[in-house]
Image: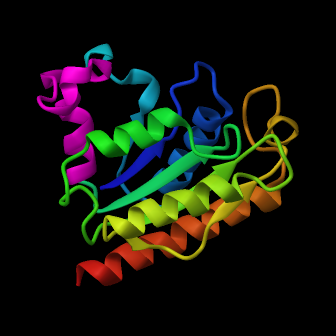
Amino acid sequence: MMTLLVGTNRPGSSTRKVARQVEEIYTELKTPVHVIDLALLPPAIFDPGAYNEKPAAFRPFSDAVLNASGLVVITPEYNGGAPGVLKYFIDMLKFPESFERRPVAFVGLAAGVWGALRPVEQLQMIFGYRNALLFPERVFIPGVGQQLDADGRLKDPDLVQRLRKQAQGFIQFVGALRR
């Protein structure tokens, strides 16, 4: 089961729109997908006591990571970095087993010209520290506001093809690691 992580809790985010299209690509490739949308995190997880005792409502989120054969992180760039809620989510997951030897791929999107290069590189360091297995083919979507049509779908067929190529490669990467 591939798990897509929508790396923001911002309502109506472009990240969720791109994630929906990535989800469709994996489905077309006949790969089961589960989506973790940080906009759906239970409010109780933000209580300071949650560091010591995770609320029961957080368990489906943490289990989705633990049960993932591969994790695709789709992150926007906020103020030159990854959204705080994404880092907080990572911090709340079990250590070390949540990412230990788990394959991870990255898609970055931003309003600016670099397409979330900075947050993806920051996340690669974090996931590397957690001993995840990083897939080298990243996809960056610059100027995301201009890349989406009125229905929230990517207009540029080359970008969609890059996402498809990444998905195909990541499926093979995960499969090779599972043998």
In this rendering, the answer to whether 57 lies above or below 16 is: above
Give whichever of 34, 122 is nearer the camera: 122
Inspect the magenta stretch and tell me whether residue 77 lies in it: no
Specify the segment rendered in magenta.
45-66
Residue 158, position as x, y percentages in the image: 81, 62
Q: Locate the C terminus and report the quarter of the image it occupies.
A: bottom left
Q: Quadrant of residue 64?
A: top left
Q: Quadrant of residue 157?
A: bottom right
Point 81% across, 40% down: residue = 111
In this rendering, the answer to whether 8 lies above or below 12 is: below
Residue 161, position as x, y percentages in the image: 71, 63
Residue 177, position as x, y percentages in the image: 30, 81
Specify whether 160 is left or right of 129: right
Specify whether 82 is left or right of 160: left
Point 24% across, 78% down: residue = 178
Residue 8, position as x, y percentages in the image: 53, 33
